[in-house]
Image (spheres, grey):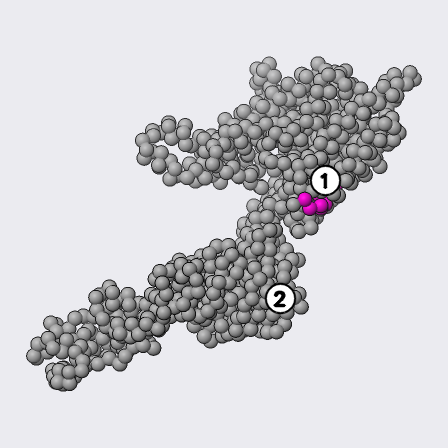
Amino acid sequence: MHRVGIDRVTLAGAVIGLCSFGLHFAVLRPNRLSSGDGLFVWNALPSSEAIILVLLWLCALGAGLLYRKNRPFRLAPGLIGNVVLVLVFLFTAGMATNTTDPDLPFLRISIGSGGWIMAFASYILILSSQQKLADRGFLRLFVSLSGLTAIVLLLATGHLSDISVIKEFSARQGRFLSELSQHLIIAGASVGIATIIGTGLGVWAFRSRILERPVFFFVNTVQTLPSLALFGLMIAPLALLSQRYPVLRDLGIQGIGWAPALIALSLYALLPITRNTYTSLRILDPDVIEAGRGMGMNGLQVLWRIEIPLSLPIILSGIRTALVQSIGNTTVAALIGAGGLGVFVFQGLGQAVPDLILLGAIPVIVLSVCTDKLMAILIHQITPKGIALQEEPAS
Amino acid sequence: MLTSSLKRIVRRSAGTILLAGVFLYLVFDMHPWNIFLRALFPEETEWIYPRAMLIELVGEHLLLVAISSVLAVMAGIGSGIFVTRRTGRAYLQTINDLTSLAQTFPPVAILALAVPFIGFGFKPTVAALFLYSILPVVRNTISGIEAVPTHLIEAASGMGMTRRQILFKVEIPLALKVIMAGVRMSVVMNIGTATLGAIVGAGGLGVPIISGLVRQNPAFVLEGALTVCLLAVITDRLIAGIEDSSF
Amino acid sequence: MIHIRNVTKRYGTSIAVDDISLEIPTGEICCLIGPSGCGKSTLVKLINRMLEPEGGRILIDGKDTRDFQPELLRRHIGYVIQNVGLFPHMTVAENIAVVPQLLSWNREKIEGRTEGLFRLMRMEPNQYRDKYPRELSGGEAQRIGVARALASDPAILLMDEPFGAVDPLNREALQAEFMKIQSDLKKTVVFVTHDLDEAIRLGDRIALMRAGRIVQYDTPEEILAHPKDRFVSDFVGADRALKRLSRFPVSEFMKEPVVVKVTDDVDAFLAKIREEGKTRFVWLLDEQDRLIGPVDSRHVHRPFNREEDVMEANCPAITVRNSATLREVLSRMLGQGVKTIPVIDDDSRLVGEISIGEIEKVTEEAAFEC
């Protein structure tokens, strides 16, 4: 039972982690604009911290090479991964105290490619443990979230405030929060509109054979259009409309701004919701409904107790896809003046300030991932036990 | 027999071929653009993006997409096959977890993040496009191959096929439809993301769109947007045609 | 000849095949049967090296299977599994051609072989050649599966519950066809089944397995007549005497019937019969020698009246075909409460009669211990 073997995933993670030492762990810049110098681990960090990192990765290597099927070995990669993840951020922030240079008051410290790859490798270690631990057990949850929770706590208590991107954030906190809420409002509203229209379309397409093909032809085609192009296509008609009817301009509807973005985003969100509504009706077994009617349920009861519980998970799954998509596409909408976190991304690209790009891109990624995971939990909770929820279809 | 199936393919893709014809015409001949855009936006002074010909922009865009997609499809199918083989099976779940996580990242974020790490311009954009468009190909290759019923593999093995023969004669032909669906998703998404390449200096059809937004000239925007939309739809339909004709 | 010598297969701590030795003579069908998990499928997979044993050897015609590359070995062994496993993306002809192609046969040889196999399965080549598996019925797919296994003309056929997924009616037809084919081809067949009736019907020998070991390896008649232990007798069932009867074809036991045709002088014939006193019942045939029914020579009108003196007996409840076994005969006898059953051929012509006495003789041969 206690065979010694090679745990390939942990080994892969450890190898990547050790290779990351060959890239720049951190980047030091004299100010936010100039490109700085990359530093390797042994140059960036005091020797004690560097040795800790090396030791941790060697432990991971050992855990990968000498794997046994008992609990400590199943936990080890995950624990090491979480610790390394936190340390990457903590040590980078700690560099500020070590490198205060009176000649460089605007010194900027950021995580370099080596540091990011080390973080990626520690995520692989966490995945490795996750795979081996029981589903939904406490240990699994701990391994999945402890590192991230620690980072969030450090962030909140200001321990990471010396990392460049955090400084960028502190400098424009108000603006960040307003763009964040704008982003959420636009993405959320577009999915809301798409839900109302999309569920209707899905039901319609299911009921009427004639409508089915044109409806899906339309939503499928819209999905293939590049987001920037669709935003662009919305501008012209809205510009013309707002010229013709000035009242629209008073409402804020014009060629650029939130209006074309909202319309385009709603159109994009239509496909996943319409398709999933349609599918959920399609797989509803008519025998089940007949059984319900036969038991004496009226139309409303059939709807409430049978149809909705069975189709809701699938529809919510479509909404989940639509939300993730919308959050991403709203980022692009900043280009047509709709605001949102994309503002920072494009400002950063335009002014060549990498930290601004990070300030926009990282929250967008975090938002997407969190929304996806939260929706997954929600869907799992409301799925009636005994129903196997299928994975999203591939196309 | 060959001509009847050829006739069938032509009939089914008639719409696409027509669209492709229209597209090629519009790319090479700017007259209809002039007439159309002038009529829509009489107040503007310029209607056609001046700094590059539409055909050049289309070429840049296609080059971006082609290189990154070809590499992504090869690497994606290769990885998908690798993790479903005996030697790669240990990595299957990890690759699944990583790709499904990475697919929730917005493509624009990946593109933007490539800049600080790799730089501006054509090559970094190709790299970012490659990284993102490999994901659906890997996922669909894996799910397509895993969906081949095990009793077919058993029958093939029992008949004396080597593992390689089983892969090429049974698994891949049966998984092909799903794999092509992934390729289609990947390429179409790539065309869309490549539009944003204009912002990081990669050229392409996003250039007139961005220029139009900056200069507040909707004619430029329309020129780029219509062209890239046509390109996306035609590509989608073409690959769908290949997808439908495989088993 | 397949020699299985002291073969063992383990999965972790559990033993699937426990030191089994078995000899399967050339040209015979050996049925492996037993409860789930007894190791019968595992044993078959060891023969074509789909699984590798931990101990022991398997020799085919004197050569150790380990001396060959597994893929090469399998191309010369036919393998049929329960779901058939016809490749859905290939036509029927392409499916059949798979192994010949792996063996690099030229195209004409493959086409010729394919056509021959279609005829063997009694399926019209032009009709089935370009069909896809999804267009076939269950029975058709199974026959193509067998044809595919025979494509390279292997000496050995391994069949793992090949007719299991088919409905009982089709299954009987497939079994009958398979026996016909086997009588022509004389392959060495290892046939795994969980259906005892199938094993009794098809097997020249039966190996009853339990927990990885062979409990009894004998002809079906022997296993049914002399089960070695409690397990075997429980497995074959309390009605093993009846089951055994299905091994005896009626054509071997029927007697010459006493007949008279309607066109003959029936009265005279019946008078002669009464005089001789040897038989009481006579079968009446029509002009084409088809059976009409029995006539009681003692209780008959004079002159003979066809409507009242003959009981119409040409129906399946009262007759058996000459392809039937003693088991059907007994079933008819019990169902009708008679002691003699007429045997007819496919054209309803009377070819013999069989009485309870013949059946009693057969059952007497078996010694049933308590």
* Residue furthest to the left: C302
Residue C41 visible somewhere in the drawing: no
Q: Nearer the viewer, residue C221 or B8?
A: C221
Q: Which residues are magenta?
A: A2-12
Question: x, y (%) of residue A347?
Answer: 75, 23
Q: According to the image, label 1 marks what residue?
A: A10
Q: According to the image, label 2 marks what residue?
A: C57
Crowding around mark 2 (Cα neighbors within 10 Å: few <14, some 14 to 19, many 20+) is many
For marks 1 and 2, give the one nearer the viewer.
Answer: 2
Q: Secondary structure at mark 1?
A: helix
Rendered view: C298 above or below B13: below
Question: x, y (%) of residue C298?
Answer: 11, 77
Residue type, numbered disc 2: Arg
In this rendering, the count of numbered labels is: 2
Residue type, numbered disc 1: Thr
Image quadrant assignment for residue A365: top right
Q: Secondary structure at mark 2?
A: strand
Chain ID, mark 1: A
